[in-house]
């Protein structure tokens, strides 16, 4: 069977080609893609600003935010069936190397793959994709494919706060730096947990969006007095939980300065490849707890249940601001690149 699949050959070199779909291995499923989001990391790889996408090895198919339906299964697949609506993990740990057997994070896997970033793990920007059973999760039948495409993003904000020993509850005041797709997910997680939730983002559109999705207050970090505003909102104590979801140098540095005593700081936004000056001494005098998370270990099922529990309160569909048919993928990337102020989530459709 042939299918149209997108391949990224290098910066600004994205091609849609008709190729033969390989035969399924016993542990694999064939998925007919229904929707695939364009992530900021996809844009950075397309522009040549990130080394995460490995087109230096060979052309690869992007797309790690996807939802689809199983069209066929391998002979050894036991937990999934043809017709299931599904989504999948991004960071793919092998499960058998010594680091995986130690229970370490997926980013520690000695054979780690990333769906949608490498030639050996093609993503969802194609009519069909093949994924091993262990990385695929079923979503409810009443979900849209776009909902399924949000699972990977939401899991980052969710695991970023709760994973690796993290927690949040109604006694906390949370500060979320950055209100992109991952940041808005962290906002919903914090507010659902009962915490007073404050969002700092320079874009008015995103601050307004934050208020619709659970934020109690918003701050423009470009205001000269934003730190004073934060102090008032926290009764002079500072936040007890911070989720840094922007990857911005100034925001990363500010985490240590504005954190309240014993604050749990969760670094979620990407900043690898840069050295960011911070006043690390605050970790001593404020007894700060900092952590990161490479991948979202064993959180797919929890994420799907969490999203199901809050679907009546938060409209995930409204977060998809722009839709393009797969055949218009170049126009979709152009929108995601050049309209970052209003293109909150650009979604490819496969009707």
Image (cartoon, rainbow, N blue to C red):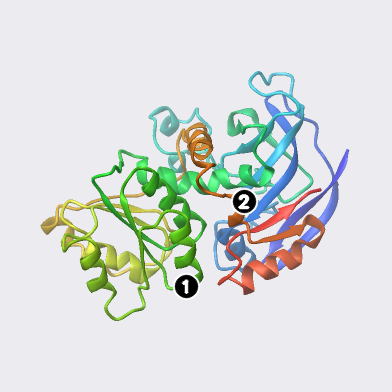
Question: Where is mark 1, residue-wise?
Answer: 204
Is any part of residue 53 visible from this angle?
Answer: no
Return the disc, 2 or 1, that comes first in the chain's sequence: 1
Label 2 Cα crowd, 10 Å radius (few <14 / some 14-19 / many 20+) = few
Q: Nearer the viewer, residue 136 or 193?
A: 193
Q: Most extreme residue toward the bottom, as rendered?
A: 224
Residue 294 position, x and y percent, is 43, 46
Q: Which image quarter: residue 144?
A: top right
Q: Secondary structure at mark 2?
A: helix
Q: Which image quarter: residue 10?
A: bottom right
Report whether 212 appears left or right of 221. right
Is any part of residue 335 visible from this angle?
Answer: yes
Label 1 Cα crowd, 10 Å radius (few <14 / some 14-19 / many 20+) = some
Q: Nearer the viewer, residue 66 or 212?
A: 212
**Numbered tag placed on residue 228 in the rendering:** none
Residue located 56% across and 39% down the image: 89
Q: Most extreme residue toward the left, as rendered?
A: 285
Q: Nearer the viewer, residue 12 or 229?
A: 229
Residue 219 vs 320, above or below: the answer is below
Q: Nearer the viewer, residue 144 or 165?
A: 144
User: CA–CA distance between discs 2 and 1?
Assistant: 20 Å
Report whether 280 appears left or right of 138. left
């Amino acid at each position: 069977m042939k299918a149209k699949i997108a391949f990224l050959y290098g910066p600004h070199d994205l091609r849609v080609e008709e190729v033969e779909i390989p035969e399924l291995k016993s542990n694999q499923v064939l998925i007919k893609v229904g929707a695939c989001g364009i992530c900021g990391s996809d844009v950075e790889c397309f522009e040549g600003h990130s080394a995460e996408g490995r087109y230096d090895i060979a052309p690869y198919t992007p797309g790690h935010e996807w939802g689809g339906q199983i069209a066929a299964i391998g002979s050894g697949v036991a937990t999934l069936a043809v017709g299931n609506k599904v989504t999948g993990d991004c960071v793919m740990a092998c499960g058998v190397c010594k680091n995986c057997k130690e229970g370490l994070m997926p980013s520690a896997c000695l054979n780690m793959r990333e769906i949608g970033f490498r030639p050996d793990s093609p993503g969802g920007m194609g009519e069909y994709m093949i994924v091993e059973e262990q990385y695929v999760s079923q979503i409810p039948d009443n979900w849209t494919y776009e909902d399924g495409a949000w699972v990977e993003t939401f899991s980052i904000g969710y695991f970023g706060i709760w994973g690796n020993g993290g927690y949040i509850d109604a006694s906390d005041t949370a500060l979320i730096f950055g209100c992109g797709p991952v940041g808005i997910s962290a906002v919903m997680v914090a507010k659902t947990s009962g915490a007073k939730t404050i969002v700092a983002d320079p874009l008015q559109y995103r601050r307004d969006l934050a208020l619709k999705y659970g934020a109690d207050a918003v701050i423009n970090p470009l205001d000269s007095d934003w730190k004073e505003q934060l102090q008032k909102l926290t009764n002079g104590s500072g936040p007890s939980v911070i989720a840094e979801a922007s990857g911005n140098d100034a925001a990363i540095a500010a985490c240590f300065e504005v954190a309240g005593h014993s604050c749990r700081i969760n670094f979620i936004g990407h900043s690898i490849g840069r050295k960011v000056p911070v006043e690390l001494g605050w970790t001593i005098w404020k007894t700060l707890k900092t952590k990161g998370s490479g991948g979202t270990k064993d959180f797919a099922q929890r994420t799907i249940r969490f999203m199901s529990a809050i679907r009546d309160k938060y409209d995930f569909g409204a977060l998809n601001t722009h839709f393009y048919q797969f055949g218009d993928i170049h126009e979709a990337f152009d929108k995601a690149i050049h309209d970052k102020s209003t293109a909150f989530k650009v979604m490819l459709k496969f009707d």
